[in-house]
Amino acid sequence: MAKMGLRERIKQGLFLLDGAMGTQLIARGVEVDKCSDYLNVELPDVVSDIHRSYFEVGSDAVITNTFGANKYALGRHGLAEEASKINSAGAQIARRAAGEEKYVLGDIGPSGDFLEPLGSLEPEELKEAFAQQAKALLDGGVDGFIIETMTALEEVAVAIEAVKSVSGVVPVLASMSFDRAGDDFKTMMGVDVETAVAKIVSSGVDAVGFNCGTVSLDEYVELAEKFVSAVQALSVDVIVYAEPNAGKPELVEDQTVYKVSPEDFAAAAEKIHSAGVNIIGGCCGTSPAHIRATAEKLKS
């Protein structure tokens, strides 16, 4: 039987993503300051092993190792000209690990700069960079795209437009990164949940959500509830998704660590799922153990 299309599949209920890529690369001895995206070319077997480890514990989809593979982010490593090759390789690695039964989402992260007038980026140039990335990912075999860790509405809008210019039929998920701001949650650029949801949903995505950020597990649950309420208020058929970190990051001997156990992460994921979030994965600090615990909790 042919695999169900991604758009249809994510409407069927629980859809479990993978956990962190960076955490697992470091655990395998990759240097922290290394360009992790280039490992798709340099150490493909390591990247493939991480993808497989997530599928083995219950992930329905993995996210390509291309978070920083736009030409602006790669340019900081002197690799801007390698963008298409890196993205294509990343998609192919994930596709081989997924086989025909599982799914692959092409990862697109922020440029690391600001659009004019705050920064030097022009919208059309940024759109071209994201479109270049999306085309290579699509050619490499992804089933859909996930645009994540955005903090500025202008940039996430450009990214969505760029992806849709490459393929208007492939599913698109888009998320922003939130921190606690008094009694509310806002991105680094001051965007609140309601504004983010309204803007992203209006761009025609299949799912809207949050990932990363510097909040506790309880706050992730609260954030999930706010997202679900914001989507319901718009009366639209859009799925909400969540990729929490393994809790709030802590600084220990000049290193960022995440201390949340797989069991505690899974308990929070269960609450997030109960709030109405059907696509769930893990961001910074999460591992196959966290995803295994979540799969056992939610798929039992």
Image (spheres, rainbow, N blue to C red):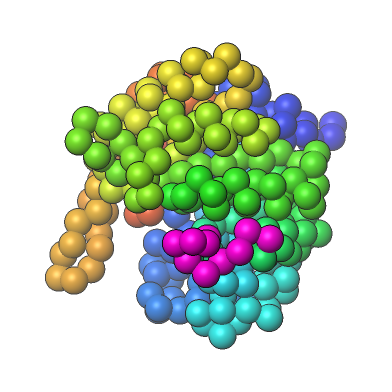
Query: What's the residue at 39%, 28% (across, down)?
Result: 224
Pinpoint residue 236: horizontal percent, then vertical percent.
61, 18
The answer to whether 203 is drawn above or below residue 149 in the figure is above
Q: Residue, x 60% and y 40% (percent of image)? A: 173
Q: Position of residue 92 (x, y in %)?
A: 73, 62
Q: Main secondary structure of the magenta part?
A: loop
Residue at the far right in the pictured view: 1
- In percent of the image, x 38 and y 75: which residue is there? 32
**Range of the magenta residues?**
115-124
Residue 119 lies in magenta, yes or no?
yes
Give the quarter of the figure containing the N terminus: top right
Asked whether 45 or 286 is in front, the reply is: 286
**Spot occupied by residue 132 in the image (x, y as percentages of width and height):** 73, 64
| Residue at the left extreme of this rendering | 253
Instruction: Tell me how many marks there are.
Output: 0
Above/below status of 163 relative to 225: below
In the rendered image, is residue 133 in sight? no
Residue 29, compared with residue 155, is above or below; it is below
Please tell me in which quadrant of the rendered image residue 20 appears. Answer: bottom left
User: 300 or 156, which is in the foreground?
Assistant: 156
Q: Quadrant of residue 24?
A: bottom left
At 57% from the left and 36% from the top, the residue drawn is 200
Q: Is residue 52 magenta?
A: no
Q: Residue furthest front?
A: 117
